[in-house]
Image: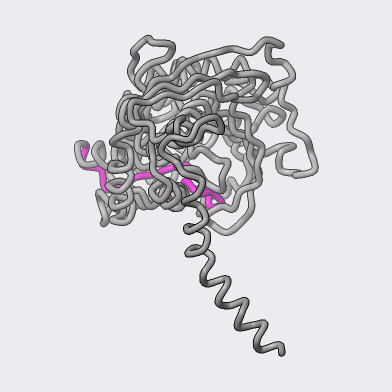
Amino acid sequence: MEHKKIVLSYSGGLDTSVMITWLKENYKGAEIIAVTGDVGQGESELEGLEEKALKTGASKVYILDLKEELVNEYIIPAIKAGAKYENSYLLGTTFSRPLIAKKLVEIANKEGATAICHGATGKGNDQVRFELGIKNFAPDIEVIVPWRTWELKTREKEIEYAKAHNIPLTINKETNYSKDKNLWHLSHEGLDLEDIENEPQYEKILEMSVSPKQAPDKEEELTITFEKGVPTSINGIKMSVLDIILKLNEIGGRNGIGIVDMVENRLVGMKSRGVYETPGGTIIYKAHELLETICLDKDTMHYKQGVSNKFGELLYNACWFTPLREALSAFIEKTQENVTGEVKLKLYKGNIINAGISSPYSLYSKQIASFDEEDEYSHEDSQGFINLYGLPTKVRAKKMLKLKK
């Protein structure tokens, strides 16, 4: 199919840097409209992006500020859910993909484009996330994925192609980790990390954080306030959730918080190793989890743990725009009605230490739990409870003894 206009999800990284030229070569006469989502990757990655895209063949460039929308529509629901993937990954890359997909469709509709192109590889999860998001908003539009068809099958060949076509790059073969950065995290994959026997070279890799070894020898204290599951202030200073994340990235980063080296099970079937930096998010998740221990009743808390795992799997597996995710979000919202209070933490060399929790909705009763006083709790009541609770065990044991005779 011929296309007059193609919208390209453009990051300015290695893949999409060469894709503008490649698309111009392979789709003769098509205008390439580059769309970049500013999801907090930083000025260094956005600087000169428009000029670079235009010089390499784009007819128009959109740079969209998506930071607030990313936080309010995607990150906050995940915080409330306590959503993780395989108990370690805090879903940093995952958050931005459905939002970017939505914006790509909006620009395609605005410009009258008949195709959308993305730079995700055929081995990764992001191809699924982009395309399911696009299908949700434009089910019939064509999606072009160069990685599935082009001759540039390795990153080294992409670099050679860029040099041959005078496409400027800020990387080389030696520093070419595959990275994804937004306001929540930074991921690192490839090179020496592909050998799982190698210890990560943290001094070389880390950008948002220092390793725990390099963190200060003195603990740092802070207090985070939540209202209905949402962080609202740090040390009594009210901030937007975006600013709270950025501030905690700074605080957590200097204390070596939130560094994860993991082998995960990708949606496409393979195991993949990555190093993730999520300093602020790790602090928020821990504080929120601690607050829930006193604000949620046992049954709700235990059931929510399963929901949290499922919610994390849905996000990871590109199922944001699904009825199940929406239904789980409704359940999670209900659980957060009383998750309000303060959490005091101490940060020390990669560790987050609980230093006190308080909430007007706390279900913890010192009078009941104390070893020093008997007030509302009677020890004598436990005998009848155990007799009834243990009745099935007693009945079965007696039956088994009788059968053995």
Q: Is residue 115 magenta?
A: yes
Indicate whether residue 256 is drawn in magenta: no
Please state which of residues 176 and 369 is positioned toward the viewer in this rendering: 369
Q: What is the x, y in percent for residue 129?
A: 41, 48
Is residue 314 among the parts visible in the rendering? no
Q: Which residues are magenta?
A: 111-128
Please give left or right for residue 228 compared with residue 47 in the image: left
Q: Where's residue 289, x and y in %?
A: 47, 35
Q: Is residue 346 above or below residue 110?
A: above
Residue 11 x, y percent position in the rendering: 45, 30
Q: Is residue 272 left or right of residue 355?
A: right
Q: Residue at x 61, y 56 (%)?
A: 270
**Where is residue 160 drawn, in percent x and y?**
63, 35
Q: Nearer the viewer, residue 284 or 383?
A: 383
Q: Is residue 296 above or below residue 393?
A: above
Q: Is residue 122 above or below residue 336?
A: below
- Asked if residue 196 is positioned above or below residue 168 in the image, the reply reads below
Q: Left or right: 99 with respect to 109? A: right
Q: How is the image coloured?
A: one colour
Number of numbered discs visible in the structure rendering: 0
Query: With 279 as the anchor, is 5 left or right in this view?
Result: left
Image quadrant where one finds the C terminus: bottom right
Q: Residue furthest right?
A: 197
Look at the image and tell me in which quarter the N terminus lies. Answer: bottom left
Can you name the residue that lies furthest to the front here? 380
